[in-house]
Image (spheres, helix red, strand yellow):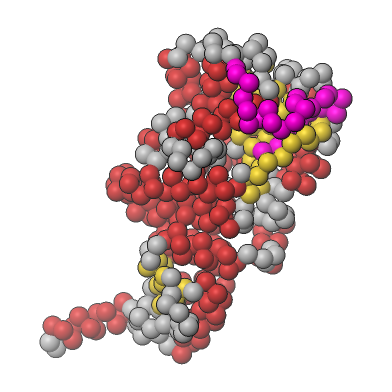
Amino acid sequence: MQRSHLVDAYAAAIHPPARVFDRWLGTRLQRAIAPAAIRLELWDASSPYSGPTLPIGSVVVHDRATLIGLIVDPDLSFGDAYTAGRVEIRGDLGTVVEALTRVTLGPPTWRERLRGVLERPNSLTSARRNVHHHYDLGNEFYEQWLDQDLVYTCAYFEHPQMTLEAAQHAKFDLVCRKLRLRPGESVLEAGCGWGTLALHMAHKYGVHVTAFNVSREQLAYAKDRARREGMTDRVEFIDDDYRNVRGEYDAFVSVGMLEHVGLHHYESLSQVLGRVVRRDGGRGLLHFIGRDAPRPLNAWTRRRIFPGAYAPTLAEVGAQVLTPAGMSIVDVENLRLHYARTLAHWRARFKNAEEHVRAQYGADFERAWELYLAGAQAAFSTGWMQLFQVVFVPLETAPPYWTRRDMYEPQGHAKL
């Protein structure tokens, strides 16, 4: 047998021609994604695409098992297949993922409803384990693509030209102005990340901060930074779960933690707020990823990236967290487009670091995070996900401001 025939035979063994059944499945899947103007290509280079216009990109499926998985359980199978290289995206990944996201906008599927029913509560043990899964990957990993202060939450872009670093600090100031922090007050922060907001509040607004977190790597970084900046007398970082918080505080703040609580533990969070927020003049702010209608997080994201996570609706937070705690909502703002822009910055930085990430963590890990960031940007760009900031006070306490003008026109703050 000549060499060319051997090569052809080997290729056919690895990628056998698509059969009638394969082409039928491919046609069915192509119809589902047709509104996105995305071309489906099978492993033998055949395609059922017949759109009136040129496709914006292609989804290439490399084997029969993957094709079946995309039909049976697309939410989980697509991410797993892309991570393993069994699905390839030709064209700009972000553009293709956003187009696919728009196609899937709609009510929850029966799979999503079933997964919601089967959701397990986040116990103290599982909550710590889930946090370790996502946040304790090594600070060096996050240093590759976050801003210089390692802020891993939505930034606030006062104008489009702002750098990511400036927008993150603008977010901190917006949070502090919404809370009307005053020198000498006590603040409880639940889920403090690498500690930048806690240090910002203490340094710029003169408050005393007690910050809880269960990520050991984040806490080690935050404590070291507090020592280096001479802030240990005003900021205390505690390795513990938010449910164990005791004491009374002038203000409560949580930025990016509520998503990890889970519906089954909203009662616990409500009890925490009811006992720690001072009834006379106390106030709080929740900054969290949310939804317009109840549904579980994307199955692949929840299983591979954010185990135990749930993005709540405003109604769920109001009815199950704030109202039972005796709290009244005084302001709500949706910053979802700010999060889409934040993710655009993160994706660009991650792209620049992808070779380093691949070398240190492996190709599968790098592809998983590439897809996760692209999917998150698409979710906020399309309105699939929201980013809410909710300010609340005890029922018997007056709102901390007369109009919203004070939030956006800072009156000056203590620089200590």
Q: Quadrant of the N terminus?
A: bottom left
Position of residue 3 relative to residue 265, above or below, is below
Q: Position of residue 160 (x, y in %)?
A: 48, 43
Q: Quadrant of residue 53?
A: bottom left
Does residue 405 show up magenta in the picture?
A: yes
User: At x 55% / y 45%, what residue is drawn?
Assistant: 339
- Residue with the most extreme right position: 396
Q: Which residues are magenta?
A: 389-413
Q: Nearer the viewer, residue 78 or 100?
A: 100
Q: Position of residue 393 (x, y in %)?
A: 78, 28
Q: Quadrant of the C terminus?
A: top right
Count of picture labels? 0
User: At x 56% / y 29%, what residue is drawn?
Assistant: 172
User: At x 72% / y 48%, what residue is drawn?
Assistant: 313
Residue 141 seen in this snapshot? no
Q: Is residue 416 left or right of residue 314?
A: left
Position of residue 102 relative to residue 134, above or below, is below
Q: Position of residue 371 (x, y in %)?
A: 45, 56
